[in-house]
Every structure is written in structure tokens, then in C-alpha cells.
Amino acid sequence: MTISVLLQTPRLILRTVTTADADAVASSWKLDAAPISHEEAKEKITWMFGNHEQNAPGRLVHLCLGIIQKNSQEFIGWCGLDHTDQTKANPVLFYLLKESYWGKGLATEAARAVLDYAFRELDLARIDSATAYENTASKRVMEKIGMMYLGLDEEGGHFFTLAKAEYFQALGRSNL
């Protein structure tokens, strides 16, 4: 499968990062921590490419896309799917934005685009997601994108899931 992914929404570009993005990756790899080195960023990009090469319809290892705001072309965060832990039944949706972009609906926009890609292009059967108990904003994103709340997970966080059939059924009824 191709390792290059490009998704667009009204306000965002979600794409595979390249070595040209090493500075952006270094400054935003862990948005809640100090930047990583340029060399470590290049290693992360190589790791992402290796994972993307293993992805195929019906099978996902890891898909990590940089989120770029269309207007400013600024690298503002990450969104994707992770299934590197094969003991988990399903891939897990994740998203992370720079704090200055919170509360603007951008996480919802990015997560919707990745869900659509997961079900249409990757042909995945089900996607899970979770958030810390106190992260009500992230919980709300999962509700807005149509994920079904299953309660608290083993770590005490909110746990969600969405099956491909439910996703397409909801699209027929609403503007998910």
C-alpha cells in the first residue's frame, strides 16, 4: 500500500509527514512536553513510514498524519490510528492539537476525516478510542463523530467504539 496519505477538510490538511517536516515533528511530537531533537524527529518519521508500509486494506499497524491548518500552513497537531498493540482488538483513533487550537472544532474535523479514511480506504471493521476521565473536550469530540460510548475502561477513562456498518448507517441519517 502507498505510504503517502493526503486528506483534506474545509480547514485542514492531514498528511503523511516527510523528512522535510523534521523541524515541525521535533517541535510537536509530544505537544505536552519539550521538543525532541532534529535527529530523533527524523527517526520518528522513518518509524512512521515503516508502519505506513505495513498498512493495507483490512489491516492497520499505525497511521500517523500531521494536521496542517490550511489558512496558515502551520503544523498544528496529529491525528491517526494506532494498532501497534496487537493485543487490542481494534485500531485506536487518536488526535492531539496545539493548545491554541483547542475549542475550535478542529479535532472533530480531523477525527471525522480519519474515520472516513479508515472505513472507506482501509476497510477497517471497527475503530476504538479512549480519553482520560477528566478530558471532557475529547469525550465530546468522540460523541460528535458518532462513536458509541461503552463506559469506563480499565484505566478509568472514557471508552468508545464505532463499527463500519454503524458509521455508514449514521451517514445515511445525519451529517456525521
Image (tube, grey):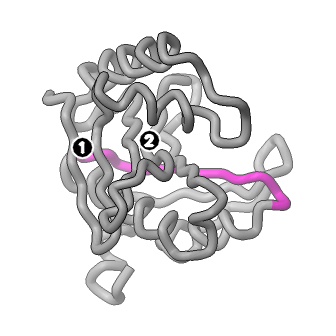
Residue 50 percent coordinates (x, y):
32, 15
Label 2 neighbour load within 10 Å: few <14, some 14-19, many 20+: many
Compared across the picture, whether 51 is left or right of 127 comes to left
Q: Which residue is mark 2?
A: 81
Range shown magenta = 123-134
Q: Residue at x 24, y 46 (%)?
A: 123
Could you give the CA–CA distance between mark 1 and mark 2, rounded to whole angstroms? Answer: 11 Å
Q: Horizontal and vertical percent for residue 134?
A: 84, 61
Which amino acid type is shown beneath numbered disc 2? Leu
Which amino acid, by three-letter code, is at mark 1?
A: Leu
Question: Closer to the N terminus: mark 1 or mark 2?
Answer: 2
- Residue at image position (35%, 21%) is 51
Quarter the N terminus occupies: top left
Marks 1 and 2: CB-CB under 8 Å? yes
Image: 125 above or below 17? below
**Residue at (36%, 62%) from the top-left corner?**
72
Q: Nearer the viewer, mark 1 or mark 2?
A: 2
Asked whether residue 61 is drawn in magenta, I would say no
Say above or below: 43 vs 7. Answer: above
In the figure, 109 relative to 64: above or below? below
* Residue wearing tag 1: 122
- Helix or strand or loop: what does disc 1 sit on? loop
Q: Quadrant of the C terminus?
A: bottom left
In this rendering, position of residue 1 left or right of residue 92:
left
